[in-house]
Image (spheres, rainbow, N blue to C red):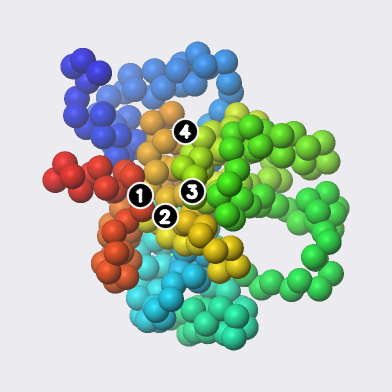
Amino acid sequence: MGNVPTSVKHCLSYEQLVQDYPWLKRWLQEEKTITGHEYPDFVKIVEVGPRDGLQNEKEIVPTGVKIQLIDMLSGTGLTVIEATSFVSSKWVPQMADHTDVLKGIQRAPHVRYPVLTPNMQGFQDAVAKTLYEMGCYEISLGDTIGVGTPGSMMKMLQSVMKEVPSSALAVHCHDTYGQALANILIALQMGVCVVDSAVAGLGGCPYAQGSSGNVSTEDVLYMLHGMGIETGVNLPKVIEAGEFICNSLCRKTNSKVAQALNRTL
């Protein structure tokens, strides 16, 4: 990368870099068209770590830890944070404290805190078109076991977008086979501008043995900011939240960006 400053190489704070290097935003915008693909100017990140990321943990995560994680994420610029899930504690015991979590968090005025309230009856046979016609404003297409590839992602979106506009779609990718970022890139090329992700790559699917975590929020942000795509999210603050929850769980982060940063410190 020649004489490009180290801060640009790290690309940790897009907003600060644009302020320090005014030419950078124009260069990134031009680069977006060189590839022959149009990408959205802004992508909304839906943080699913506190819910989808923690639901598969074997050891019960203390309620206070969940609350602190959500409060830290609320200060990153994220506008949507999945807080918990109203499911039977018999099937997902990790979410048994859902009411206490919702009562305990410090709600930020700019953040929505949706919860999962699954009801399989009446929805088990539903498809994206049916949900859209029922009035769902956003339909998240999930690869919850992480077996999708860019090819299968493209075919799925082509099929769904015959019935549902890209503006009503989001993607939810797990990274079991290391394909999540590539799949997200395909979705962006096809007009999707809402992406689910989990801080530190937390998660798995309680109903799918062997599936690894969600794509990490840190890695998605690094990619998007490097492409000049706005998110409104502060990457260093997300990394701090990731460090907090990983220390609480006594494990290493699944985020490649956080791992790389830790090696450079």
Residue named by callout 3? 175
Which mark is drawn over residue 229?
A: 4
Q: Where is residue 65 shown, x and y percent of the image?
A: 35, 76
Q: Residue at x 60, y 43 (%)?
A: 148
Q: Which residue is mark 1?
A: 255
1 or 4: tag closer to the N-terminus = 4
Q: Which residue does the numbered mark 2 point to in the structure image?
A: 201
Q: Nearer the viewer, residue 57 or 118?
A: 57
Q: Is residue 34 left or right of residue 136?
A: left
| Front residue of this view, candidates 124 and 80 | 124
Say what secondary structure mark 2 lies in.
helix
Packing grade of label 1 (10 A; few <14, some 14-19, many >=20) is many
Residue 36, horizontal then vertical, whole percent: 57, 15
Instruction: Residue type at mark 2: give it.
Output: Gly
Residue for point 43% across, 29% down: 228
How far separated are the C-alphas under marks 4 and 2? 21 Å
Label 1 to label 3, Cα distance in Å? 11 Å
Image depth: mark 1 or mark 3 in front: 3
Q: Earlier in the sequence, mark 1 or mark 2?
A: 2
